[in-house]
Image: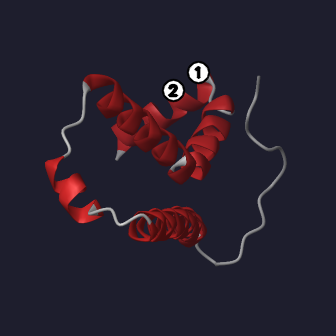
């Protein structure tokens, strides 16, 4: 199943790299915002129940399933972060041909 949107992306800057960078910044900003809300909620619930959240976090030792869950979450975030670059690379690869490759090699050999 193709999970990439079709069609040309709108371009806001003269340089495509700037558009990619802005997309990545927006993904990171949304991740930070969600995390900040989540941390705020946890702190409020803990305080309302008289829990020493900071002390509990300092003593926490994660087991293997927890470490794997964190890594999976990290990978999902990186997938969202690099989505546009992967999509554009896939589109560029789809347009590659053996003839085009040979032409590039020939051009490099002359230079």
Residue 30: percent from the left, percent from the top? 57, 66
Q: Quadrant of residue 94?
A: top right
Q: Residue at x 73, y 39 (%)?
A: 4
Q: Which mark is residue 35?
A: none
43 vs 22, left or right, is left
Are the residues tagged 2 and 1 within 8 Å (C-beta)? yes
Q: Residues within 10 Å of mark 1 (few under 14, many from 20)?
A: few
- What residue is shown at x 83% (from left), y 44% (from top)? 6
Q: Quadrant of residue 13?
A: bottom right
Counting other residues with Cα less than 10 Å from the Cα at mark 2, is it few (<14), some (14-19), or many (20 or more)?
few
Q: Which residue is mark 1?
A: 98
Looking at the rendered image, the quarter that the N terminus falls into is top right
**For this view, does 66 lie left or right of residue 103?**
left
- Residue 11 placed where, x, y %? 73, 70
Q: Position of residue 110 (x, y in %)?
A: 37, 41
Q: CA distance from mark 2 to mark 1?
A: 6 Å
Identify the residue at image location x=38%, y=41%.
Answer: 108
SS at badge 2: helix
Circle count: 2
Residue tagged 2? 102
Q: Position of residue 104 (x, y in %)?
A: 48, 37
């Amino acid at each position: 199943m193709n999970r990439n949107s079709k069609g040309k992306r709108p371009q806001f800057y003269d340089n495509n790299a700037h558009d990619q960078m802005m997309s990545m910044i927006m993904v990171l900003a949304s991740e930070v915002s969600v995390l900040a809300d989540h941390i705020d909620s946890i702190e409020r619930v803990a305080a309302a129940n008289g829990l020493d959240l900071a002390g509990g976090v300092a003593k926490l030792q994660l087991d293997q399933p927890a470490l794997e869950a964190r890594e999976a979450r990290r990978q999902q975030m990186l997938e969202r972060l690099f989505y546009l670059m992967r999509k554009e690379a896939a589109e560029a690869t789809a347009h590659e041909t053996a003839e085009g490759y040979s032409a590039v090699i020939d051009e490099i050999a002359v230079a």
